[in-house]
Image (cartoon, coloured by chain):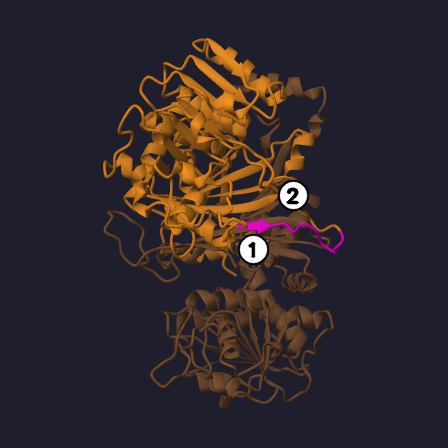
Chain colours: A orange, B brown
Amino acid sequence: MKNRDVESEAAGRKSNIETDKQNISFLYLSEEDMIDAGVLNPGRCVDVMEETMGLMEDGDFLMGGPYNDAHGLMLYFPKKSPIENFPVNNARDRRFIAMPAYLGGRFHVAGEKWYGSNGNNRAIGLPRSILMMMLNDVETGKPLAYMSGNLLSSMRTGAMPGLAAKLLARNDSKVLTLVGPGVICRSSLRAIMSQRFDIDTIKIKGSSPTSANAIKMKEYIEENYPQVKNIVLCKDMEEALKDADIITEAVSCKEGEWPEYKREWLKPGALVISTSTFNMEHKSIVDLKKVIDNYGMYENYAEEDNVGYDENGDRLHTGCMGEDFVYMVQDGLIERDSLTTFGEIIRGKKPGRESDDEIILVSIEGMPTEDVAWAYECYTYALVHDIGTKLKVWDHPYAF
Amino acid sequence: MKNRDVESEAAGRKSNIETDKQNISFLYLSEEDMIDAGVLNPGRCVDVMEETMGLMEDGDFLMGGPYNDAHGLMLYFPKKSPIENFPVNNARDRRFIAMPAYLGGRFHVAGEKWYGSNGNNRAIGLPRSILMMMLNDVETGKPLAYMSGNLLSSMRTGAMPGLAAKLLARNDSKVLTLVGPGVICRSSLRAIMSQRFDIDTIKIKGSSPTSANAIKMKEYIEENYPQVKNIVLCKDMEEALKDADIITEAVSCKEGEWPEYKREWLKPGALVISTSTFNMEHKSIVDLKKVIDNYGMYENYAEEDNVGYDENGDRLHTGCMGEDFVYMVQDGLIERDSLTTFGEIIRGKKPGRESDDEIILVSIEGMPTEDVAWAYECYTYALVHDIGTKLKVWDHPYAF
């Protein structure tokens, strides 16, 4: 109805503006398009995460907030509300989060992941989180892509344990333990298996040895990794951790019900990766090498949570290893400099593994830069291979 | 290539899950679609903003952060960078912002506005900000709509001065002053004219009486509002403010170069609306009625900026009236309770205008709840009238 106005406005501008620069369109990629664009390629995703961690070490990125270190901005649902129909926090992981970032280097692109999460989704056959991803030209701000973000996000999250396995596991690693065998753990498995070719034993620790997720994981491994000769469904954490070369965790649980690891269960040379929540006594891990993705982000968490001490004067734990590392620094248990980032290892500023006996702890939280990187990789593949739906924002911006 | 897997996965689930609930699609609305869906209707937008402010007073909303009051999460570009090709803050308003919110009542929907802004865009014929808007089901998080957000955002921003004029202007208002005659001011004009039918004189204060924007605004008024008998291009601020019943400001300027208003230039009964930046001496406005959109949001700004005092011990100003109000409270110049929100007036908790002589100051910053409200209104109109492009995220979520 107003198209005529748009046209006349545009005509008036043609004299002094290159109109082809005014046209804005973007690429929409459904989940199926994302699969066609290679989103499920674990080895490639590990490579791109390595690039990303390197660029972050260079400072060639932006995250949100005045200190460039915000994980995202969350809508917090209250536990209860007097208002009829108000959405309340009545399920695990109920939240919305906006996660913006810019990544430099060959990416040179801004973007944002935006998602809503609700544990009740499972009951109707939907993923707990439903994620959408946007990419934007960092110069003009115009949209480049809008894409289904579920696979993207699972893949980049799993790729980080894959990167840890590549950089920090013993080269002769044979035994892999999966703690919390859900979607993220499966993605971690795929990424680790793309880097470590000698793994012949996989131990699975679900909520029980017969949990549906544990059995599904076992079947998945049997189908996809014939080189794995032994698959063990573990009855407890001690059994799961004993003799493991690589342990990767992705547990979703209630506050305070994190799995507990004991130092004596870890074999010399073990690589212990956390992407979600688990717990170890602070004093027991003082001397272990600690690798993290981003210190500032954990500092933000620590500041926000501001956990205190128990009646014995011991620091309360948070379930988030990186955040606990910050408290250990604050409590004088370790030096800030004893923490190593992926980027420092990749850029050769600090060593990775220094001996076959060293036990290494890795805390991974996930950052919006990783989403931007993997989204950009899929987007450029889609562009070249003509995948997706091109959509117009406008031919010429309407000016009223 | 993986479609077969998706199908078999889905088939396996069909037995115990209603598969129609797994299907996710959303509506894409281009700028042209948004126009067809009524985004440019100023009177309706004022009504929806009134609903929104009422719901916010009820507490029936969520904004970001633990205190539900975050305006958004910003990517800050540095002034300079040693990194080649790093995007730097070399133009006015260069930033990205993610603005998530939930709005209750009949809306009961989550959403987010995401935009990039760069003053250099003007040179290539693009708007300074390019905005996209998403709406999401608040229960599952699934996307409902992805839409061009430029008109949406301009309209909701202009509708708030329209709402101020409706609630707070003298009923016999005849003289309207526009300070900073750009896109937002034009939107404010349209909204105010939808509420106040006796306006016969409009004064325009641009960067100069012959600025392109000022002259364009004059032509626009001549074309669209034949009831306006006098249009005055003002040479200075004093001329612009004298005799005005309603003053609305939307100035984009460099830090510290805000227009300065003097108390003695305001006529008794004047309504002074700020949507961007201007300045008045704090001591001169102590006794005036002050109306704001959201106190917590300005408190956040004040905390982040943390401006100090000049060499005379006078508080430094910020150009943002609402933020300055917070400093006035902190400095003991006014009581917190002397500030009134739109919502308090709408819900009858505090009076609006109490006399024909009262001068009222209104500070409007803009909130993501407003975007969600107006986006939802356009989205539901589009659904009913079959406007836009329906796009699939997935038929069944892929589970690897």
Whether residue A269 appears in this view of the structure is: yes
Residue A207 screen position, x and y as percent = 60, 26
Image position, residue A299 (x, y; %): 42, 50
**Residue drawn at (51%, 20%) of the image:** A239
**Residue A82 magenta-highlighted:** yes
Asked whether, in this view, residue A314 is left or right of residue B287, the answer is left
Identified by mark 1, the residue type is: Pro
Mark 1: secondary structure: loop
| Apparent side of residue A78 relative to residue B178 in the rendered image (left or right) | right
Q: Residue at x 52, y 74 (%)?
A: B326
- Provide residue A290's location: percent of width, then percent of height: 36, 37
Instruction: Characterize the magenta stretch by its predominant secondary structure.
Output: loop
The residue most toward the right is A84
The foreground one among B86 and A268 is: A268
Q: Are marks 2 and 1 in contact (CB under 8 Å)?
A: no
Q: Residues within 10 Å of mark 1 (few under 14, many from 20)?
A: some
Picture coordinates of residue A63 (x, y %)? 40, 48
Q: Amino acid at mark 2?
A: Asp
Q: Which residues are magenta?
A: A74-84
Mark sitting earlier along the chain (2/1): 1
Gap between marks 2 and 1 measured at Cα:
21 Å
Residue wearing tag 2: B137
Placement of A194 over or under A334, stated as above or below: above
Q: Residue A234: say if magenta.
A: no
Chain assignment, label 1: B
Quickly name the residue at label 1.
B66
- Residue B166 left/right relative to A2: right
Residue at left offset 73%, top offset 53%: B106
